[in-house]
Image: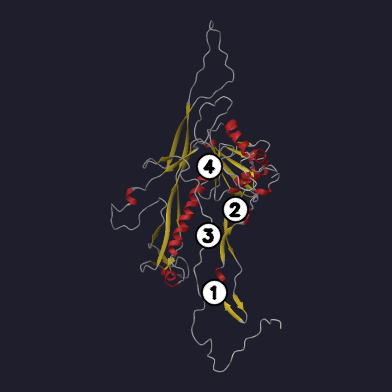
Amino acid sequence: MPATWNLPSTTAQWGVQDVERFNRMPFWMAMQQTKQLPYWSRYKDLFGTIKWKTNMGDTLVGVVNEYSPKTTQIHKPKYISNTPLRTVASHFERSNTARIYRHKFESPQFHFLPSFRDFRTGQLDFASKDLNRQVAFGFDDFVRWQIIQFSPNVFVVGADTPVVTGVPVGPPGEGNLVDPKTAAVFQTLGAMVGANGYLDFRAICAVRSAANNVIGMVPWDGVPGTPADNNYMDGKWVLMGEAQIYEALTFDQHILNNRPLAMNLLNSKFRGIISENILFRQERYSLRFDASGNFPQPEIEAAYPANGTIVSGTSTVTDPGGALRSEVVPNPAYVNAPFGIALWLGNQPYDGIDIGPPPSEFASGKVDTTRVSKLNWNGEVRITDDLLINYGGSSGLDIASLDTNKYGEFLQLFCDTTLGLIPKTPRYALPIIYRRINYPSLLPGA
């Protein structure tokens, strides 16, 4: 006879104990681990540094020797029998100016109760790692934005005149003040990008030609020697940008047509130095902007639909995690931003500023050994209980609702940073504005 499925089981109903009679845990909670893409710094130790000297003001002026320019293509001396003409060569110097910056990072105040009763342990340790991550973001973003704002030239892929000069130049606006290169400037530059203004192999080689022949940039690895016969000036360059730039080389038609036979791009990715002298360095969060010239935030908190109840057959259980179903994900506005900025770097266009420790009387307890708080601006995440607590009066400034943390119920993580970067030869860093594509294998002509 045929098999019969899903028949009800028969259970004797005489003398069965009530299954809901005893206490039980409503949920079993288990820690889960997930892998996330790591963050790597590309701007830490990228350039040389100048040590800051204390008690010398708050502005650093760097001085660079400049050779006298070559002012003619033709040299026509007089005959030896006539009075000779003369050339007077007068060298000069130029100066660069920088100020140092300071920024603080803090966590919310932590109450002891979550660490006492909540399931997840080690919450302060994770919060410390998270704050350190934000400090790393801040340093890289600071250096990169300084480079962008100080750059006197911009390369726009696909524009009629790719090297754009005369762009606004200067230090970024302090805090929330306006930058020299505003959103309107980036909007204009983005509109100049060609319809096929992707940063492909030919465009990358065009940037190299501009660096060599238009801007007169010294390569990343320094001043090269005299070119050999049947050769041109050697020297390596650095291209800093998003992964898609390098990924696209696998499908680049020029590379596919001219690759060595040993280079298998049909079954593997492109690898190695681009055109023998261009080093590619991938950024974790590259600069991207929209058609209005605004830079969207790279990540957002995405809230998923809350599972208020879990239904299984005739049983319904309330989900206590229904309100906690959110995740940090890439921001669609950032992922789909139409324009990107890569950096073409020559030889040491900037110097970092090694600011050193704070004044000794603020950084140590030598004057008064009973001091608890000490000034420390080296980026170290610290913990404190030196807090003012608001117990929620009728207004935030109600003196009756304020108290010190004398019971030690609250803690807070904090970090103090100082940053500085001084231009040396800013034209040796060239921002490249190009049209982005998230799927390099679908590039037109690939």
The local crowd at label 4, few if under 14, some if 14 to 19, many if 20 or more residues have their Cα within 10 Å, is: many
Q: Helix, strand, or loop for circle 4?
A: helix
Q: Which mark is residue 296?
A: 2
Identify the residue shown where x is 52% and y is 76%: 27
Q: How much space separates mark 1 and mark 4, taking CA atoms?
A: 48 Å
Q: How much space separates mark 1 and mark 2, taking CA atoms?
A: 33 Å
Q: Position of residue 422 (x, y in %)?
A: 47, 40
What is the image's colouring? secondary structure
Q: How much space separates mark 4 and mark 2, taking CA atoms?
A: 19 Å
Quadrant where the C terminus is found in the figure? top right
Question: Which mark is first along the chain, 3 or 4?
Answer: 3
Query: Disc 3 marks which residue?
Result: 35
Query: Disc 1 marks which residue?
Result: 320
Nearer the camera: disc 1 or disc 2: 1
Amino acid found under the numbered disc labelled 1: Pro
Q: Which mark is residue 147?
A: 4
